[in-house]
Image: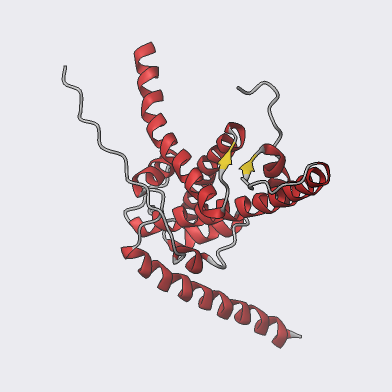
Amino acid sequence: MSEMSEKTETTSDARRRILNIAVSTVLLETGFDAADKVSLETLTEMLQCFFAEVGNSAKGFCELSGRVEPVLGDVVMALINMGISLQGIEQYAARPNRHVIQPPQQAPAPRT
Amino acid sequence: MQMSRIGSPSVGMDDDGCAGHALGDFLLQLENYNPSIPDSVVAYYLNLTGFESQDPRLVRLIALASQKFLSDIVNDALQHCKMRTSNQINQSSKNQKGPKEKKYVMTMDDLAPALQEYGITAKKPHYFV
């Protein structure tokens, strides 16, 4: 049991670490030189909550219209419903000095 | 009266159509685009909530939107930080002269007012280590 919980913690840790790197990347791009642990952790938690909220909301809109797989409209509705502005997203996507985080390596399945 | 009532939604629909087209075009561009956050990580968190899409472009759109959201907040926090430090430097330069190199450090003091503008109340936990 304890092994199990430890395992789930380490697997979610890998994604969480990448979110941490993503937040740090955004901070560096914006012009911060450093951040304290509390604010970094707050932003990481917010990013994770953002994904959870968009996913939940988009799924809700999708199922409300009787579909199984979400389409663009569902995601846009979810984002707008959350009050996220999509105004300058194309300019943001094309911004210079963009940094792409390497996707995590797939761990080999443990053999018993 | 009747005319205007019929007229106004169609105007709204037109606007939606334009925005939809623009976003649709943007979605096509996302085909060959890599956001900073890897697809697999975003997809994992989306799958946790039951959102399962075969289209990686939707995942990329969400990743990009989240990053922009974060970037907007952090930019606000940076402005707060700059204002705060410039006040401090003005005060300290009266006492001791000499140029001090500026290093911007994000703290909860900057982040909390920036988040407040977005309607998010963040309080510094007292016993967080």
Is A3 rendered above or below residue B12?
above
Q: Relative to A17, is A71 above or below?
A: below
**Residue shown at 67% from the left, 46% from the top:** B100
Task: Pick whichever, A96 or A20, lies toward us.
Answer: A96
Figure quadrant of the C terminus of chain A: top left
Locate the N terminus of chain A and report the quarter of the image it occupies.
Answer: top left
In the rendered image, residue B123, in percent from the top left (x then y), is placed at 71, 34
Q: Is residue B104 left or right of residue B37?
A: right
Query: Residue at point 59% right, 62% down?
Result: A85
Quarter occupied by residue A42? top right
Give the side of residue B59 with respect to residue A56, left or right: left
Q: Where is residue B65 shown, x and y percent of the image?
A: 50, 57
Q: Is residue A40 left or right of residue B38?
A: right
Residue extending farthest front = B97
Instruction: Confirm whether residue A70 shows in the render.
Output: no
Q: Residue shown at 16%/21% (left/top)? A: A111
Q: Residue at x 71, y 50 (%)?
A: B80
Depth order, front residue of A50/B70: B70
Quick one: which residue is furthest to the bottom in this view? Answer: B3
Q: Which residue lies furthest to the top in this view?
A: A2
Describe residue A53's horizontal placement relative to residue B39 as left or right.
right
Q: Is residue B73 something one can see in this rendering? A: yes
Residue A73 picture location, percent across and down: 47, 63
Q: Count the marks.
A: 0
